[in-house]
Image (cartoon, rainbow, N blue to C red):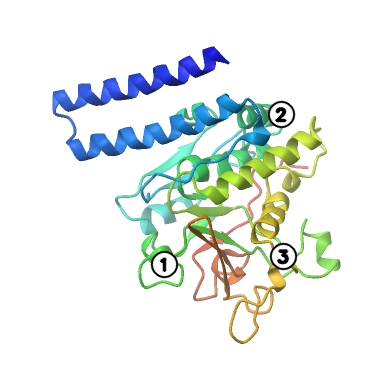
Amino acid sequence: MATSIDVIFSYRFLVVFVAVLFLAAGYFDVANIHSAVHQHMALVQDKVSYFATGSQHNYHRQESAFDEVCRVQFVFAGAKYNYNQFPTLQSWIRFADPTCPIEFLRTNHPFLGLLNIAEARMFHELAFLPILQADMLKLLAVYYLGGVVVDLDVEARKRFPQDWTGVDTPLASCDVVLGMEASCDTDECLKMFVRKGQIQNWAMYSRRPQSQFFGEMFDFIVAKYESMAPLNKGVSVQEVAGSGPITDFVQQYGNFSRPHYLVEISRNGGSLQSDTTNIMRIRKQHEEICIVGRSYTGGGCAKQPQCLLFHHFEGSWRRPA
């Protein structure tokens, strides 16, 4: 325990030392140095809290101390079986603001050094099935880095972030954006989906790193995984770090008395199920969590005026039969 704490505080000293060095060299101004140090200290303090308790059950996510970020990121874990199925990547170069970094995230990305013990254990144990690790990497990226994380076969349809969360958009006040995948509210449709009112995980957005919502979601997913482990290759992909637990967590986080997709959220009594253009807003812990109807990011939304992106369902991770 003492060794872990010593490492954390050694890192604290290193960050401050490097910041002073850069300042002396004239590389950055005072405001930028202060911001960088403040952000690193927030991450360090979050990990100190974890190591001090020694228990995942007592671990409490700190409220985000970060500023808004503009990032587009794709995850790439394991082999793909058809490398010709990614013609949509250029759409993000076209629609993303030129100031927004666009990045491919692999399983050795430096930010993964920030994971706590339980997160790191789950991440490495999922390497036996790359699609599971990719799903987890998406969640880790949206929490630790912020911005939008999308699958490789997702096409941008509108400018990011201007037409997503710009001041004149319906999502202007949203800190987090998740989207309904399809209109599924019957037992019959569960032959195709893992949940009624399923939330897709091919695109997720966080206005800033370390969202309290995504942090608690990840704790929820890790706890579920630990109750299931060890996994085998026959596990349902969407039940590990996919749409299953994401949908379950939204239901729990909102503390709804009925299924989230049936909750009345408009003046005329409409829900996410009855009106695909509706937006559910969960205001909690200084954040606004927006669950958008399937007209925004759902499967087949391309013809809808609200559609922000389109998922092509290439399934490049699946091994050919």
| Disc 3: CA contacts within 10 A as few (<14), some (14-19) or many (>=20) | many
Q: In this view, does 32 lie to the left or right of 268?
A: left
Look at the numbered discs 3 and 2 and tell me whether their residues touch, using CB distance below 8 Å: no
- Element class at badge 2: helix
Residue at the (45%, 46%) spot, across then down: 146
Q: In this view, does 302 lie to the left or right of 200?
A: left
Going by the numbered disc 1, the residue's amino acid type is Ala
Q: Quadrant of the C terminus?
A: top right
Q: Distance between the residues labelled 3 and 1?
A: 24 Å
User: Residue 20 versus residue 198: which sits nearer the camera?
Assistant: 20
Residue at the (60%, 70%) spot, across then down: 293
What percent of the width, then of the height, locates residue 88?
Answer: 49, 54
Q: Nearer the viewer, mark 3 or mark 2?
A: 3
Q: Which of marks 3 and 1 is nearer the N terminus?
A: 1
User: Residue 128 versus residue 173: which sits nearer the camera?
Assistant: 173
Q: In this rendering, is residue 277 above or below 159?
A: below
Q: How many labels does the image show?
A: 3
Q: How far apart are marks 3 and 2 (CA)?
A: 29 Å
User: Residue 35 versus residue 141: which sits nearer the camera?
Assistant: 35
Look at the numbered discs 2 and 1 and tell me whether their residues touch, using CB distance below 8 Å: no
Q: In this rendering, is residue 64 above or below 288?
A: above
Going by the numbered disc 2, the residue's amino acid type is Phe
Point out the residue furthest to the bottom here: 268
Residue at the (68%, 44%) spot, across then down: 220
Q: Mark 3 points at which residue?
A: 197
- Element class at badge 3: loop
Q: Earlier in the sequence, mark 3 or mark 2?
A: 2
Q: Which mark is residue 172?
A: 1
Q: Earlier in the sequence, mark 2 or mark 1?
A: 2
What percent of the width, then of the height, locates residue 162?
Answer: 36, 63
Q: Residue 128 carries which label?
A: 2
